[in-house]
Image (cartoon, rainbow, N blue to C red):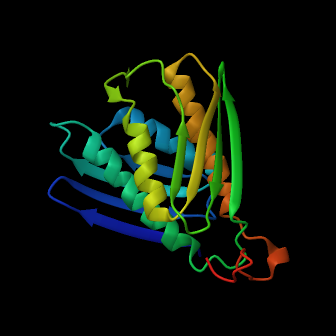
Amino acid sequence: MRTAQITRETTETQISVSIELDGAGNYDIDTGVGFFDHMLTHVAKHGLFDLTVKATGDLHIDAHHTVEDVGIVLGQALAQAVGDKKGLVRYGRGMCPMDEALVSALVDFGGRAYLVYEVELPTAKVGDFDTELVQEFFLALTSNAGMAVHLVQQSGRNTHHILEGLFKSFGRALDESTQIDPRKAGAVPSTKGTL
């Protein structure tokens, strides 16, 4: 079972995440930030992960700490769930059109954290969600998962569509990168012999 359950408690947030990589896309997500919950459901559904995220935070200030800390804990859970990475596909790509919007996501689960975020959003908010927090989420996630992630927007005029396409594409890329390839016979996917 490639699973993980991580809890993080600070004076700003209390976060609990559980994930099963070889799931069916089931999810139970409640962060108190509606649009963010909506985006995380796409990662689970299109990545076919079973994902539970429970978060409470200082939303009376804003959603920054909650969104960033969910990224930290989800990244840690992903790193734990992939384990020693033996037989791991390692690389993944996803691209999901969402009406006029198209964003590609490419993932390397190679142990080195890096984020390329080439996304231009037409509006600073979707509802009451600050869209700049999406980049903060992915920075926290990649840093804690040890992944290189490239998120590149090809087109889009509607902020909701762009972000929905981004999270769906990321879910698909993450699913591909975390698969086990039986042809690798349990070898680590690196010429170095370690990741």
Residue beneath the point at 72% across and 74% down: 189
Pick the residue in front: 82 or 3. 82
Pick the residue in front: 51 or 152. 152
- Left/right of residue 186 with respect to residue 111 in the rendered view: right
Pick the residue in front: 155 or 8. 155
Residue 98, image x, y percentages = 64, 26
Residue 36, image x, y percentages = 40, 38
Determine which quarter of the picture holds residue 72: bottom left
Residue beneath the point at 45% across and 55% down: 141
Is residue 182 visible in the rendered structure shown here?
yes
Residue 167, image x, y percentages = 55, 40
Q: Quadrant of the N terminus?
A: bottom right
Residue beneath the point at 65% across and 64% down: 178
Please, is residue 38 above or below residue 13 in the view? above
Is residue 18 visible in the rendered structure shown here?
no
Determine which quarter of the picture holds residue 188: bottom right
Residue 172, image x, y percentages = 66, 48
Determine which quarter of the picture holds residue 5: bottom left
Please, is residue 13 above or below residue 131 in the view? below
Q: Quadrant of the C terminus?
A: bottom right
Residue beneath the point at 57% across and 16% down: 157
User: In the displayed image of the protein, which residue is found farthest to the right?
Assistant: 183
